Amino acid sequence: MIMARRREEEKILDVNAAMQGSLVFSDPVNLRINGRFEGNLKTKGTLTIGKDASVLADIEGETIIVFGYIKGKIKVIKILSLMSGANVNADIVAPAFSIEEGAVFNGRCKMKGEKLNLSELSDYLSIEETKIMEWVGNGKIPVDKENGGLIFDRRDVETWVGQNR
């Protein structure tokens, strides 16, 4: 069962079903998965994996909160939180990562620092390097030059992205 409801301009999608495939949300939505999902998932907003959920997927999202089971790859823009009872077997890329007592994590974790090079920023934003270089050339994105290369401050870029949505 998929239910969408609106609460004070907040988009909420609550999925309590078995699904397989690719889901992409280009607009921010608060998504909660309570059933089984297999495939690829790309979200903006907050993704919550419920305590009874089983997710076998490669996931990209802004904020991810896990109470259930995930196996796959996880790429997070803001923060990944594993709550008590979570069981995660994944390779993770996240700037911030919290694990509550009672959660289980097996895998690798790479935490992005505050300074990103062009390739890291491209991965972080899921945007091609040529587009980022176009923004640099037009003076649209905050950038510093360091040792002959381009360096992007993650917080400055997040602020810029928020202002240019």
Image (spheres, rainbow, N blue to C red):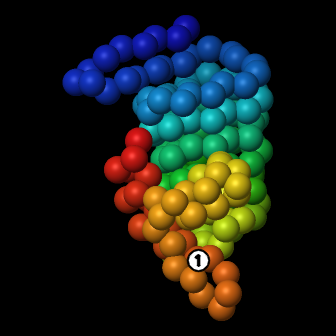
Q: Is residue 24 above or below residue 158?
A: above
**In what quadrant of the picture does the C terminus appear?**
top left
Give the residue at x 36% y 14%: 5
Dot 1 falls on a residue whose secondary structure is strand
Which residue is at a point 59% across and 52% down the rendered structure image?
125
Residue 63 in the image: state x and y as whole percent.
Answer: 48, 47
In the picture as drawn, the residue positioned furthest to the bottom comes out as: 147
Say whether residue 102 is visible. Answer: no
Q: Which quadrant of the rendered structure holds the N terminus?
A: top right
Q: Is disc 1 surrounded by few (<14), some (14 to 19) or many (20+) residues within 10 Å?
A: some
Residue drawn at (39%, 47%) of the image? 164
In the rendered view, tell whether residue 69 sits above or below residue 2: below
Q: Residue furthest left?
A: 8
Q: Spot the residue most to the front.
A: 138
Q: Position of residue 72 (x, y in %)?
A: 77, 44
Report x, y in % for residue 135.
Answer: 55, 57
Residue 129: x, y in percent? Answer: 70, 57
- Can you identify the residue that label 1 sits on? 151
Q: Is residue 149 above or below residue 154?
A: below
Closer to the camera in the image, 150 or 89 = 150
Quadrant position of residue 69: top right
Q: How many marks overall?
A: 1
**Residue 104 vs residue 27, the one in the foreground:** 27
Q: Residue at x 62, y 14 (%)?
A: 17
- Disc 1 residue type (three-letter): Ile
Q: In this orientation, does residue 130 appear?
A: yes
